[in-house]
Image (cartoon, helix red, strand yellow):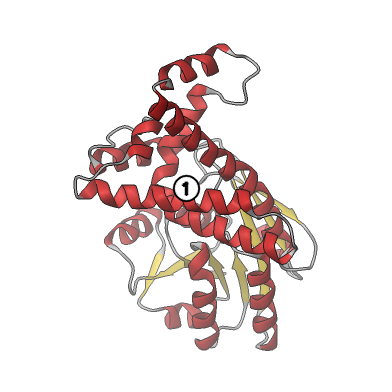
């Protein structure tokens, strides 16, 4: 079976490798992709095609693992390329977006499966959850048999898996945002060392200092994606007339974190990064390296 992968980022590459392990031939489209993406795809043994149109013609299925704000545009491009087959969108996206895409695809004879990945990219011995919803979700689950992705079929209604992802994300990523804010407050007030010492001593604390440091290091480079995800969650809460303050606050913090990452390039100040103890806050390149190395065994929410 030929499966097209959109796109071989860190998580996408992990998904593609799992599909290959199950016997699929995994293709990717190199047009508009970076040199880093090419390196990942080549190392993983994925087969290159020049364009998305070529991918849609060559493959019986497409698996999408994209940032939240790219899902709708890419789905439209796939429709325009006259793809016919199974489309698994395993991106972190809004449930309403999943339902809209499913309806548009159904009108064109495309089977849409809503996917949600909860956990880090697969490493040796690790397990990450992949939740699936849609009429062909059971078939898609078999594509990942024997891999580090533990699949669970949630029924036939697209959007269900995306809802679960959002519920998990608001807890995990809002807590991460609170970690940043608590440490910045402590830094401003001169009690950061005492706060960390308290967390280390207090067995009943919600914060494990060692785990907190790992999560803070690995999350900073993901700040733009996390901000987009929190914005989607805020809209979901608003549509249900539920309070959205927690998601909105987390969105703003991750947006600020993304701005600080860019400011570091120009030698600017990064108080949030500094308070979080992110190594190399005064040197963007060193910090990115630390984040990438740490992500190899990440337990961060995806």
- Name which quarter of the figure residue 79 lies in: bottom right
| Residue 188, image x, y percentages | 39, 29
The answer to whether residue 17 shows anywhere in this view is no
| Left or right: 71 as drawn, with respect to 88 | left
In the image, what residue occupies the spot 71% across and 66% down? Answer: 239
Q: Residue furthest top?
A: 201
- Name which quarter of the figure residue 193 lies in: top left
Q: Residue furthest left?
A: 267
In the image, what residue occupies the spot 43% across and 78% down? Answer: 52
Report the front residue among 56 and 166: 166
In the image, what residue occupies the spot 46% across and 77% down? Answer: 55
Q: Residue under label 1, please give it.
A: 253
**108 lies above or below 221:** below
**92 lies above or below 27:** above
In the image, what residue occupies the spot 35% across and 71% down? Answer: 30
**280 lies above or below 128:** above
The answer to whether residue 215 shows anywhere in this view is yes
| Left or right: 268 as drawn, with respect to 274 | left
| Residue 123, image x, y percentages | 49, 40
């Amino acid at each position: 079976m030929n499966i097209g992968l959109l796109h071989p980022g860190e998580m996408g590459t992990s998904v593609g490798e799992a599909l290959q392990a199950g016997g699929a031939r995994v293709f990717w489209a190199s047009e508009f992709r970076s040199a880093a993406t090419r390196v990942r795809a080549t190392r993983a043994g994925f087969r290159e095609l020049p364009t998305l149109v070529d991918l849609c013609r060559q493959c019986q299925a497409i698996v999408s693992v994209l940032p939240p704000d790219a899902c709708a545009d890419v789905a439209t491009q796939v429709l325009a390329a006259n793809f016919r087959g199974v489309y698994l969108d395993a991106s972190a996206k809004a449930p309403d977006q999943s339902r809209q895409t499913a309806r548009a695809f159904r009108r064109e004879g495309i089977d849409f499966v809503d996917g949600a990945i909860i956990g880090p990219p697969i490493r040796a011995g690790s397990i990450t959850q992949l939740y699936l919803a849609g009429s062909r979700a059971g078939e898609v689950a078999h594509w990942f048999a024997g891999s580090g992705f533990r699949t669970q079929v949630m029924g036939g209604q697209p959007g269900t898996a995306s809802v679960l992802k959002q519920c998990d994300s608001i807890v995990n990523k809002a807590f991460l945002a609170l970690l940043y804010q608590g440490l910045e407050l402590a830094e401003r007030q001169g009690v950061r060392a005492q706060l960390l010492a308290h967390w280390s001593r207090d067995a009943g604390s919600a914060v494990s200092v060692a785990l907190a440091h790992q999560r803070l290091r690995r999350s900073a480079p993901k700040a733009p994606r996390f901000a987009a995800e929190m914005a989607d969650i805020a809209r979901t809460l608003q549509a249900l007339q539920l309070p959205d303050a927690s998601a909105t606050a987390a969105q703003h913090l991750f947006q600020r974190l993304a701005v600080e990452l860019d400011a570091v390039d120009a030698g600017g100040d990064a108080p949030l990064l500094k308070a979080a103890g992110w190594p190399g806050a005064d040197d963007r390149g060193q910090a990115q390296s630390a984040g990438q190395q740490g992500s190899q065994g990440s337990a961060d929410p995806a």
